[in-house]
Image: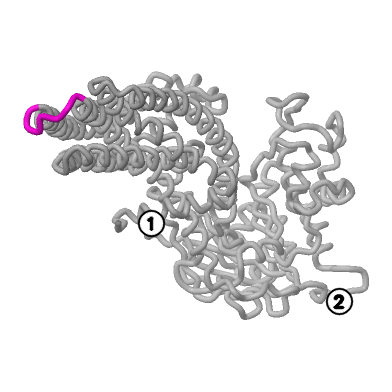
């Protein structure tokens, strides 16, 4: 089965999901599968016991009657008992495998080297559907086991019918339209669902905007509530209309297929009763087995439909995510240097964000020397943050390459490279944990190391934040949690900066406007102190010989920028100037002009 939508083939993807379930819970999976098959047998043999009972009664054969009665009793009790045991075992298996699958998906997303899957609309739609399916992907195993059970029932039932006459096997042929309709139907409905995935995602987003607290103030101030409701309804209709149409059309074909099988079933009963002039037992077997055949076929194709239309598609998206994550680390065979000797070099680097052709960086070539403090400046949209993202390997260059000590950064494993980075960003995340852990996350092995966290807090100038917390570093952050406290945006920013300072000797320290909420004097004093420490290295070391660390400062305040050893000026996606503060001021170019404008504003 080939894939035409960029997803891996269906059945191999399901097989991979089954193997993952087996790796997580081998014993429970084996027992669950075995119990599903065992639970199918008593029910499938019911038609046989009815035939034997009828033959025994009509022939006055007491032994056969007793045998048939015992079989009916065992089948009834066995069906109930095995079903209960099977459900209990499968429930335990599904509970445990759900945890494994959710953890697997979360780990995959966290391990993806770039952010492209968060910005391509097609990838976003796949991720949105996978997130909605991963919590019920465990049902795939239950559905697969149940399908095998129905197939076993179907095989036993067909064998009983053929024992009356080989021509009765044609009932299976007349059942094929129901199978084809059931397997075709979910695909049609899924295609309609995926075509409208963006509209469905928009409807959910608008619902969140209208009902959650974060946008609540602006929604009420601007009085856009009615508009949000109307837009959400319109987006929902754009998704649901085509889906409903596809469902109606596929249901009509499905009903026609079942009408064909129903006619064949009636014909089979007439054939056995009139044409063969068979005994009551044989007629009763055909009635019972034929009725069960229709139920078994319906259940089988229904489960296959679910597998193909939902659970199978979930396993395909899971397989796609696995393949996508793996593709980004292939060829990453170069070690990360212990220290920087040559520095980092951009060679004709260009970059456009996924889904666009506009270059955010255009033919950038610049050398960042080891042991230096580098400032990147430019107006909004000039490409400053994008350059930082490329250094962090959140994206790969569209053209050109980035060299670290002469080796392509793309050849270094992303996890190994990032383990040598540290940084803080303007768009930081508020980790509502204890203050200790919110900062300690910056260096996971030292998450619970209170002295290390306290040192990072001091380096970030966040002592005043911790001192105001009721329980110090042990204080729970976030007012929605028990005993949690709310802190200001500036305080959150200081803790985020402290998190970026947890790693003491990174190869690359990135500070991308992490103190925008602080006043200019505080930012200047903080960066000046840290730049001096970064240049000095350990006591007695010659500058630049400790680890060759490069510190990147991105700031819109030129009082901070001037302390850097090397300044890169970006404009229109290109590097227009570079050099020291003194050299750029003497040149009288764009940097000098921007510096003069800001200095005049402060005066």
Q: Is residue 276 magenta?
A: yes
Residue 17 spot, x, y in % from top left: 48, 50
Q: Which mark is residue 542?
A: 2
Please state which of residues 272 and 520 is positioned toward the viewer in this rendering. Answer: 272
Tell me where residue 369 appears, x and y as whole percent: 69, 75
Disc 2 to disc 1, C-alpha distance: 55 Å
Residue at point 65%, 54% (across, down)? 512
Magenta region: which residues?
274-280
In which quadrant is the N terminus drawn?
Answer: bottom left
Q: x, y percentage for residue 44? A: 35, 33
Q: Is residue 176 left or right of residue 194?
A: left
Q: Which residue is mark 1?
A: 8
Residue 96 position by quadrant: top right
Left/right placement of residue 122 relative to residue 496 reads: left
Looking at the rendering, which quadrant does residue 399 occupy? Answer: bottom left
- SS at badge 2: loop
Mark 1 lies on a secondary structure that is loop
Is there any visible trace of residue 117 in the rendered image? Answer: no
């Amino acid at each position: 089965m080939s894939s035409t939508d960029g997803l891996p083939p269906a059945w191999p993807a399901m097989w991979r999901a089954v193997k993952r379930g087996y790796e997580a819970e081998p014993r429970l999976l084996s027992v669950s599968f075995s119990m599903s098959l065992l639970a199918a047998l008593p029910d499938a043999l019911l038609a046989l016991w009815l035939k034997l009972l009828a033959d025994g009664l009509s022939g006055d054969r007491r032994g056969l009657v007793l045998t048939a009665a015992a079989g009916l009793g065992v089948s009834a009790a066995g069906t109930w008992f095995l079903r209960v045991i099977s459900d209990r075992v499968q429930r335990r298996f599904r509970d445990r495998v759900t945890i494994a699958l959710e953890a697997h998906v979360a780990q995959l997303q966290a391990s993806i080297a770039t952010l492209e899957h968060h910005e391509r609309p097609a990838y976003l739609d796949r991720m949105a559907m996978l997130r909605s399916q991963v919590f019920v992907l465990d049902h795939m195993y239950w559905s697969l086991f149940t399908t095998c059970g129905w197939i076993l029932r179907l095989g036993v039932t067909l064998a009983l019918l053929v024992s009356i006459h080989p021509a009765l096997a044609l009932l299976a042929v007349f059942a094929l339209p129901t199978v084809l309709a059931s397997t075709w139907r979910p695909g049609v409905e899924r295609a309609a669902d995926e075509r409208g995935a963006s509209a469905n995602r928009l409807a959910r987003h608008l619902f969140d905007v209208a009902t959650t607290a974060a946008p609540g103030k602006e929604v009420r101030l601007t009085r856009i509530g009615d508009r949000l409701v109307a837009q959400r309804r319109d987006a929902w209709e754009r998704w649901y209309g085509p889906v409903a149409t596809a469902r109606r059309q596929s249901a009509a074909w499905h009903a026609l297929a079942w009408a064909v099988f129903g006619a064949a079933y009636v014909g089979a009963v007439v054939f056995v009763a009139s044409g063969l002039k068979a005994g009551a037992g044989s007629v009763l077997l055909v009635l019972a087995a034929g009725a069960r055949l229709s139920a078994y076929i319906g259940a089988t194709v229904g489960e296959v439909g679910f597998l193909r239309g939902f659970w199978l598609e979930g396993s395909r998206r899971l397989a796609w995510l696995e393949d996508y994550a793996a593709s980004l680390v292939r060829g990453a065979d170069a070690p990360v240097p212990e220290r920087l000797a040559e520095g980092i070099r951009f060679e004709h680097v260009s970059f456009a964000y996924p889904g666009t052709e506009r270059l955010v960086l255009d033919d950038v070539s610049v050398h960042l020397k080891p042991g230096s403090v580098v400032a990147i400046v430019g107006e909004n949209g000039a490409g400053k943050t994008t350059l930082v993202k490329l250094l962090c390997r959140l994206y790969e260059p569209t053209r050109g390459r980035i060299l670290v000590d002469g080796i392509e950064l793309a050849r270094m494993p992303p996890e190994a490279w990032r383990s040598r980075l540290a940084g803080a960003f303007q768009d930081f995340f508020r980790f509502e944990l204890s203050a200790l852990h919110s900062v300690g996350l910056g260096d996971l092995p030292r998450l619970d190391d209170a002295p290390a966290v306290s040192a990072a807090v001091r380096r970030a100038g966040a002592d005043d934040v911790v001192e105001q917390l009721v329980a110090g570093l042990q204080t729970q952050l976030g007012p929605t949690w028990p005993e949690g406290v709310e802190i200001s945006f500036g305080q959150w920013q200081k803790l985020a900066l402290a998190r970026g300072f947890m790693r003491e000797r990174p190869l690359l320290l990135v500070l991308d406007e992490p103190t925008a909420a602080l006043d200019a004097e505080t930012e200047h004093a903080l960066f000046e102190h840290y730049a001096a420490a970064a240049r000095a290295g350990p006591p007695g070391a010659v500058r630049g010989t400790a680890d060759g660390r490069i510190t990147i400062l991105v700031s819109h305040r030129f009082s901070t920028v001037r302390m850097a050893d090397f300044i890169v000026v970006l404009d229109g996606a290109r590097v227009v100037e570079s050099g020291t503060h003194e050299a750029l001021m003497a040149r009288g170019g764009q940097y000098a002009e921007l510096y003069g404008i800001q200095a005049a504003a402060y005066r």
